[in-house]
Image (spheres, rainbow, N blue to C red):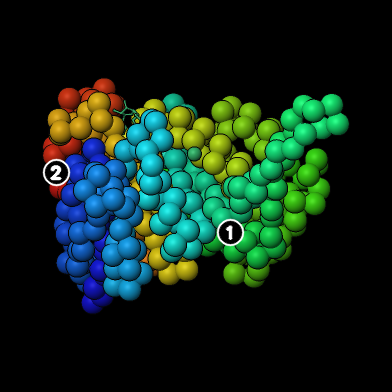
Amino acid sequence: SRTLRIGLIPGDGIGKEVIPAGRRILEALPASLKLKFEFVDLKAGFETFEQTGAALPDKTVEILKNECDGALFGAVSSPSQAVKGYSSPIVALRKRLDLYANVRPVKSVMTAKNPIDMVIVRENTEDLYVKEEKTYEAADGSKIAEAIKRISEKASFRIATMAGEIALRRQNIRDGGAPSIHKSPMVTITHKSNVLSQTDGLFRATAREALAASRFSSVGVEEQIVDSMVYKLFRQPETYDVIVAPNLYGDILSDGAAALVGSLGLVPSANVGEGFAIGEPCHGSAPDIMGKNIANPIATLRSVALMLEFLNEETAAAKIYAAVDGNLEEGKLLSPDLGGTATTTEVVEDILRRL
Ligand code: NAD
Ligand code: MN
């Protein structure tokens, strides 16, 4: 048997309602999986900032680094006006734990008219987000602003390798009983190398090279220019399995893709580095519905499964995905964001029954 130590960081707002649901589903996994969990409650977020002066206390980072195998992060509230000393703890966590990939699966119910089952694998450390910008004056005194777009062979290779591994694992999870529209794994490399031949050209060539490894022989590889990709993403989303993209395109594509499935309350994500993963629902702290027990817990439950995938617990992940899909397909106990009347607790309990 294996014991995994999981840091729980609820954060603010509905984070405090959905992270306990994530803990419950881990505790409810069948004993036959021989998996045990220990939980460590950790602080981060705006409330933590107001109490302690730090949005991400050092203690939280140290415990995650030294004691935990993975973590679940709820959501944090960011004030709309800048508050001195406050910056987003999840951005800081990604940096301090070198979580170089942001992974976002987008899946609809399989009985939908246009079923969707894709995952976007976004490079998370470079590209335009190195934030090396400058502003200067042209000869006529008007302003010019410039930013560095940095693409490295190393970061491109490791993100494409991760995309290949995810494609293989998704096949295993389908084989393990999670319903899907895909028959065989496929990775789509996204770029704009027809214009940016050096930067995106390097990303494209390196991703091709990484995916040519023999262990990916069963994974199909295709590539697409990012603008035509957006068109196809909206017209034929069912054609995509795994998408790998540099940081900026990945950011835009993953928010766009999330809109295809109706509610933010359904979409999970993971921040992944070497041997560590943080599951995180894509939604924010939703102050408009907090404290009412109506937040959709599914984004979090799927984030739990995604975290388990990266901790090499595919069987456990497949069970959670199948239980969630079962709840959505039956469609009797849905939260209000999906047009239902069920409470958070009722949705969680229905999904636990299906484990
Ligand atoms: P939001 O995601 O919190 O909410 C957007 C809308 O979606 C709201 O109407 C909300 O009720 C609904 N919604 C979100 N999650 C839901 C769920 N699980 N079930 C049912 N409905 C759900 O985004 P926002 O309103 O723009 O931001 C609110 C706060 O969250 C802000 O302080 C913002 O800075 C923060 N935020 C945090 C993150 C994060 O922690 N990663 C992401 C986005 C926003
Ligand atoms: Mn974004």
Please state which of residues 120 and 45 is positioned toward the viewer in this rendering.
45
- Residue at screen point 70% across, 48% down: 148
Disc 2 on helix, strand or loop?
helix
- Which residue, given by chain and number where applicable, does mark 2 sit on? 349
Outermost residue, front side: 141
Outermost residue, right side: 139
- Count neighbours of disc 2 (C-alpha within 10 A) and say few if under 14, some if 14 to 19, many if 20 or more: some
- Residue at screen point 69% across, 48% down: 149
Residue 120 image position (x, y, % from top left): 52, 46
16 left or right, relative to 117: left
- Which residue, given by chain and number where applicable, does mark 1 sit on? 159
8 in relation to 128, above or below:
below
Outermost residue, bottom side: 1
Q: Exactly how many numbered labels are in the figure?
A: 2
Please state which of residues 236 and 252 is positioned toward the viewer in this rendering.
252
304 left or right, relative to 246: left
- Residue at screen point 74% across, 37% down: 136
221 left or right, relative to 311: right
206 left or right, relative to 47: right
- Residue at screen point 20% across, 63% down: 39
Residue 190 visible in the shown view: no
- Count neighbours of disc 1 (C-alpha within 10 A) and say few if under 14, some if 14 to 19, many if 20 or more: many
Residue 20 image position (x, y, % from top left): 18, 49
Check disc 2 and give the amino acid type: Glu
